Amino acid sequence: MHEENSLIKPKIVALFGNPVKHSLSPIMHNIAFDELKMNWFYFAFEVDKRKLEEAITGIKTMDFRGANITVPFKKQVCDFVDRLTNEAHFIGAVNTIINNEGELIGDNTDGFGFVRALIANKLNIENEKILLLGAGGAARAISYSLMKNYECDLTIANRTLLNAELLTQDLEEVTMKNIKSYPLNEVFRIISNFDIIINTLPVDPPPRIIDSLINNSNTCQIFIDIRYGKMLSKYFKALEEVDIKTMDGKTMLLYQGVLSFEKWTGVKPPIKTMKRALL
C-alpha cells in the first residue's frame, strides 16, 4: 500500500540544471506521484555552476531520494557522486542520481529513453544509415544504446572532431562495430547518404545541414531532435515541407523519466498519465 498518510515525511526528488524553467519533468513526475497517492514531490532547481558540488552534497544533507541532472551539468556530476553504474561510467555522464541510504549512485537513463522513444514511435532503425550530431553526454548515451540494440551504420559529427573521434573509439572498443566520425562543418557534403539524422546539440543544427536537406535530393526519412519546445518549429516545418518526418525529445523525456521513477521508488509509474502531462 502506498503512503497515503499526509503525516508521513514527504520524499523529495529534484531536477538540477541551468536553465530549468522550461522543463516538463516536474509536471510529469508530480502527476504520477499524485495518481499513485504517494507522498513524494519533484522540484526543479536552477543551480549556479559554481555551486554544483554543494547542490549534489545537498541531496544527502536534505535526504532527497534522488535527482535528475540536465544541461549543462551531466558530465561534471560524475565527480560528485559516490559511484557510477557501468552505463554511466562508459557514457561519462549522469542524468539520474539515486540516494541509496546516503550513497549517491550516478546513473544514466537517456539511452534507454531514446530507444524506448523509437519503439513507441514505431521506428525500426535496423540496418539504417544514421548521422548523430554532437558528441556530448546525450550523444554518448544515445550512441551507446543504439549500438547495443541495433545493427546500424553510425556516423558521429561534431564541431570538435577530436571529441567525435574519441567517442567513436570508445564505442568501437565496447561494441566491436565500425563507427565513423566527421567534422560538423563539413557533414553537409555527405548529408544525402543518411536515412536518419539525430540532433543532440544544445542548439539548432547548422543551417547548411538543413539547407542541404531541403534543396537537394537525399535519402533522409526522419530528423530527430532530442530537445523539445517551440524553438524547433521553424526548422521542423521546413523539413516537413519536403516530406522529411520530424520527432522531438518529448517521448525520450517520458521514458528516461519512467526509468528514473522506477529507480527512485521501486514502483512502476502510470506511463499514460505521464505522457498526457507532456502534451
Image: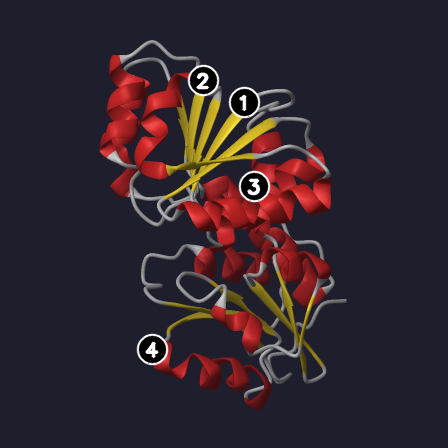
| Circle 3 residue | 114
Amino acid identity at mark 4: Asp
Q: Is residue 239 above or below residue 70?
A: above
Visible residue check, residue 113: no
Element under disc 1: strand
Outermost residue, right side = 1
Name the foreground residue: 17 vs 144: 144
Sequence-wise, the earlier of marks 1 and 3 is 3
Where does the image place residue 240, in percent across and percent down from the top left? 32, 19
Amino acid tagged 3: Phe
Rounded to the nearest whole Å, what is the CA distance between mark 4 and mark 3?
Answer: 28 Å
Is 241 above or below relative to 25? above
Task: Give the secondary structure at mark 3.
Answer: helix
Label at residue 129? 1
Residue under label 4: 48
Q: Nearer the viewer, mark 1 or mark 3?
A: 1
The residue that label 2 is drawn on is 193
How far is mark 4 from mark 1, CA to CA?
39 Å
Q: Earlier in the sequence, mark 4 or mark 1?
A: 4
Question: What's the CA distance linking mark 2 and mark 4?
Answer: 42 Å
Mark 4 lies on a secondary structure that is loop
Q: Quadrant of the C terminus?
A: top left
Amino acid under label 2?
Asn
